[in-house]
Amino acid sequence: MRADGNPRAPYDRIIATCSVRRVPHAWVQQTTVGGIIVAPLAGDFWSGALVRLETAADGTGRGRFIGGARFMPMRSERPRPDAPVDSGTARRGTPGSLPLPALADLGFALYAGARLPGVVMADGTQDGRYQLWFHDREGSAATVNAQETWQYGPRDLWQEVMAVYADFVTAGSPGADAFGLTVTAEGQQVRLHSDSQWG
């Protein structure tokens, strides 16, 4: 499905087989009212989520995240190269009491991705230890395991993540199914329940 117009539209269903960073509004325009769009989204903080949208008569698509999904990104939406990280700015610290695996949960990742735009997160095991990696695209980074943290660049990314996690817990630690997505001609907004919207 191309993001531009298609003479065979409108469609009852659109199913994307590569991930996009934003659902093109052209897909909404090319779907019948009440039609369904299913697409994998690739955010910075979260590596992949599946969203199901229903189109409305007002030209919007609204729906919910329905689980994780990792697909190859659409070629035109692959991220630009990151700025290099200056290892000479390394600062060692301690991780505090956050449950590190909980930060990779899709619910928190959706919440943090909206609160920390442009911050990339990855997790995995290195030297037998579970570890998280964070970086922005301007040269700041952090690595965190249960024993220590290392931060680089002008931002204290780990402190920012900890503050967002505290807000997430205060909000009731919502799961991924509590988040929705709205696509309009102006762009898309991730929302938590019905009372909060973020770009």
Image (cartoon, helix red, strand yellow):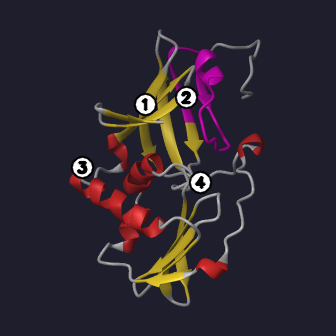
Mark nearer the N terminus (1 vs 3): 1
Tell me where the magenta segment starts and ends, as one range. 11-38
Three-letter amino acid code of the residue under disc 3:
Ala
Residue linked to disc 1: 63
Residue linked to disc 3: 171
Image quarter of residue 195: top left
Residue 192 vertical placement versus 166 (above, below): above
Residue linked to disc 2: 37
Q: Are marks 1 and 3 in contact (CB under 8 Å)?
A: no
> Depth-wise, is mark 3 or mark 2 nearer the camera?
3
Residue linked to disc 4: 70
Q: In this view, does 26 lie to the left or right of 195?
A: right
Instruction: Check disc 1: other Cα within 10 Å, few if <14, some if 14-19, many if 20+.
Output: many
Q: Give residue 71's position: percent from left, percent from top.
A: 64, 51
Q: Give residue 163's position: percent from left, percent from top.
A: 34, 61
Q: Is residue 3 left or right of residue 28?
A: right
> Depth-wise, is mark 4 or mark 3 nearer the camera?
3
Q: Do the residues labelled 2 and 1 touch (CB within 8 Å)?
A: yes
Mark nearer the N terminus (4 vs 1): 1
Q: Distance between the residues labelled 4 and 1?
A: 19 Å
> Depth-wise, is mark 1 or mark 3 nearer the camera?
3
Mark nearer the N terminus (2 vs 1): 2
Query: In the rendered structure, does residue 193 fall within the stretch colored magenta?
Result: no
Residue 41 vertical placement versus 103 (above, below): above
Q: Which residue is drawn at the image coordinates 77% and 12% (left, top)?
A: 7
